[in-house]
């Protein structure tokens, strides 16, 4: 498929979605979100893809937020009430995607950039990256989950500080508060992401999907219900060929060859 706002590539088991709007520092518009969803849909039933990376093209920006030149033309509530929930659903689809999704934060990640990063399973950032949710400075608030996912990652107090002040934070501070999971020098970003993806891609796709489901769904409920979710996902793994292969390989002292079945 031909895309206008993103570039999609595949390297062995890793598929990469790179937002490609350098003229606006990879700021996203509704079309961008639809293209990201289309790319995710194309990988869903592709068994050769084990891990998805979301990033931005160029050296300056991951995703610099929403395209303000487009948002400024909106007339009000009615213009947002249709597109915003659709964008939120796409963010939730990233979060609950059946395959692990890694955010490669190569530069500026503001507003929607930080929000999309929050949807990913693991965030790897260059030391030069800048993150934040500065929507308050425009007279609005985050709309792609920033008021919800951010406090779940960094705590309510820090999330409120970021949202209410609109301040930018360094990658080092983002790492300290738990918004970034892996922090590396910019020159080492590609190798760090590749190493992480390779390690994850070697695992059972069935177990990876069940692990994501257990964690994501369990975090939204009480511990008793969460344990039931974990038990169901655990038992689903036991019904897979991958479980048999994994345990057989362990007993035979060899590396398992998981097929995702």
Image (cartoon, grey):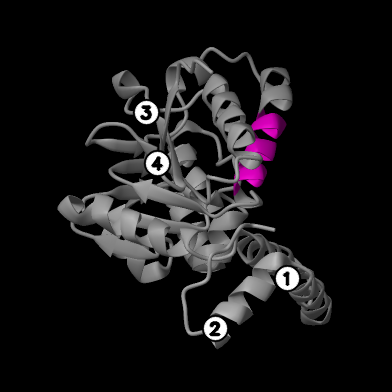
Residue 125 highlighted magenta (yes or no): no
Q: Sequence-wise, which precedes: disc 2 or disc 3? A: 3
The reply to whether discs 4 and 2 touch (Cβ–Cβ < 8 Å) is no
Residue 46 position, x and y percent, is 60, 40
Q: Which residue is mark 4?
A: 110
Q: Mark 3 near mark 4, Cβ–Cβ under 8 Å? A: no
* 61 displayed left or right of 119: left
The answer to whether 241 appears left or right of 147 in the picture is right
Of the numbered discs in the image, which one, if any, rests on residue 250? 2
Q: Which residue is mark 1?
A: 237
Task: Look at the image and give the residue range highlighted in magenta.
Answer: 84-94
> Does the magenta segment cover residue 86?
yes
Q: Is residue 53 above or below residue 219?
A: above
Marks 4 and 1, how far apart at CA: 38 Å
Q: In the structure shown, which secondary structural element does the residue marked by tag 1 occupy?
A: helix
Residues at marks 1 and 3 touching, judged by CB atoms closer than 8 Å: no
| Nearest to N terminus: mark 4 or mark 2 | 4
Q: Nearer the viewer, mark 1 or mark 3?
A: 1
**Magenta-highlighted stretch: main secondary structure?**
helix
Residue at left 65%, top 19%?
A: 76
Q: CA distance from mark 4 to mark 2?
A: 44 Å
Residue 148 lies in what quarter of the image? bottom right
Marks 4 and 2: which is nearer the front? 2
Residue marked by disc 3: 26
Pick whichever of labels 3 and 4 is earlier in the sequence: 3
Judge the density around disc 3: few (<14), some (14-19), many (≥20) Cα neighbours within 10 Å. Answer: many
Residue 34: where, in percent of width, then height?
60, 25
Q: Nearer the viewer, residue 161 or 46?
A: 46
């Amino acid at each position: 498929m031909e895309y206008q706002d993103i570039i999609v590539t595949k390297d062995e088991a890793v598929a990469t979605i790179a937002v490609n709007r350098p003229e606006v520092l990879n700021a996203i518009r509704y079309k961008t979100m639809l293209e990201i969803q289309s790319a995710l849909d194309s990988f869903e039933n592709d068994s050769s893809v084990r891990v998805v990376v979301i990033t931005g093209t160029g050296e300056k920006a991951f995703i610099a937020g929403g395209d303000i030149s487009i948002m400024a033309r909106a007339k009000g509530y009615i213009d947002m009430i249709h597109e915003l929930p659709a964008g939120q659903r796409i963010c939730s689809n990233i979060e609950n995607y059946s395959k692990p999704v890694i955010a490669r934060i190569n530069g500026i990640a503001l507003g929607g950039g930080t929000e999309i990063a929050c949807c990913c399973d693991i965030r790897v950032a260059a030391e030069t990256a800048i993150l934040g949710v500065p929507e308050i400075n425009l007279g609005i608030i985050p709309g792609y989950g920033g008021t919800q996912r951010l406090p779940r990652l960094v705590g309510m107090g820090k999330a409120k500080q970021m949202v209410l002040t609109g301040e930018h934070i360094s990658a080092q501070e983002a790492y300290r508060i738990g918004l970034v999971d892996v922090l590396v020098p910019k020159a080492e970003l590609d190798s760090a992401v590749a190493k992480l993806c390779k390690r994850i891609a070697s695992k059972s796709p069935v177990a990876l999907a069940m692990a994501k489901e257990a964690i994501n769904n369990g975090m939204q409920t009480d511990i008793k219900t969460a344990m039931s979710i974990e038990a169901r996902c655990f038992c689903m793994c036991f019904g897979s060929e991958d479980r048999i292969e994994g345990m057989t390989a362990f007993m035979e002292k060899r590396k398992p060859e998981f097929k995702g079945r």
